[in-house]
Image (cartoon, helix red, strand yellow):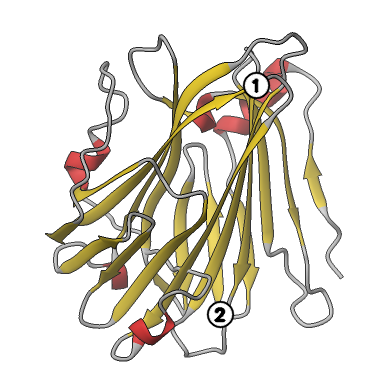
Amino acid sequence: MNKTAIVTLAALTAMSTLAIAGDFVIEDSNSTATFGADGQNSWVIDGVDHLYEQEFYFRRSGFNDEVNVNSLFLLGQAVSDTNPFTDDRDDVFSSLYSDGNGLEFETTFTLRGANQGSSSASLTELISITNTNTTNEAITFSFFQYVDFDLGGDFSDDSGEIVDGNTAHQSDDDFAISEVVVTPAPFAFQMGDSPDISALWDNGSIDTLNGDDSYQGDVAWAFQWDITLQAGDSFLISKNKTVVPTPGSFALIGLAGLITARRRRA
């Protein structure tokens, strides 16, 4: 049985080193997911990498740009195994970051693979954001998820849409992915060309997602939540991603899970 592997750092230097170096990998059945310095950078199912990148950003009131959560002060990271008797590998990855000014971001990813050769798997994501101030100071901020899937490892021939403001679908000739925001519904969303969505971050300006809900080509999307947290309160986001082969894949839309594929750009 795998032991739970926990990394909790006592010094700033050690924390910074861990935040920059080394990937964490979780595995279950036919699937693996990898997390690096900037966020998730791989989701492999039956040997095919479907995810290029997924990252989380936030912008506090008064900021003039969005900040990658993974660039913050790392408090700890852990992997663990939830099904040791059926699959003796770590299938959960958790991280805890602080902005040093009252906000803590905890993310937990749980991977569920399927039978070998099924080309399907799912990933459940829980994000907990807490105002740790001991005074009565409220914090107002926006939180963003950005994700770029390259189904089948090919980024040029996908089509996607956002339905009901909380569900993103993307497909090509061979695979389909569905991401469902279980709760709470995003305040805003945007789907479009991957370079355009990626350019929203680290651009020196405040960005609000524009509501575009479909795109064909190099698909990427983002969700936005606008939040005010009182001291001691937490905000919880629950999301499910599922990747399945086509045809017939959209029969699984609405189920937990979504698979992602990594793209290599020239």
Residue at the (78%, 12%) spot, across then down: 134
Residue at the (51%, 26%) spot, across then down: 71
Disc 2 is placed on an element classified as loop
From what the image shows, is residue 234 above or below residue 34? above
Q: How many dots with numbers? A: 2
The amino acid sitting under disc 1 is Gln
From what the image shows, is residue 253 above or below residue 50? below
Residue 137 percent location from the top left of the image: 65, 10
Q: Nearer the viewer, residue 83 or 37?
A: 83
198 relative to 181 in the view: left or right = left
Q: Which residue is mark 2?
A: 30
186 relative to 208 in the view: left or right = right
Q: Give the foreground label among 2 and 1.
A: 1
Quarter of the N terminus within the rendering: bottom right
Residue 189 percent location from the top left of the image: 30, 45
Residue at the (61%, 66%) spot, across then down: 111
Disc 1 is placed on an element classified as loop
> Spatial distance from mark 2 to mark 1, Cα to Cα?
42 Å
The amino acid sitting under disc 2 is Asn
Can I make out residue 108 in this image?
Answer: yes
32 relative to 85 in the view: left or right = left
Q: Residue 68: which numbered mark, if any?
A: none
Q: Which residue is mark 1?
A: 230
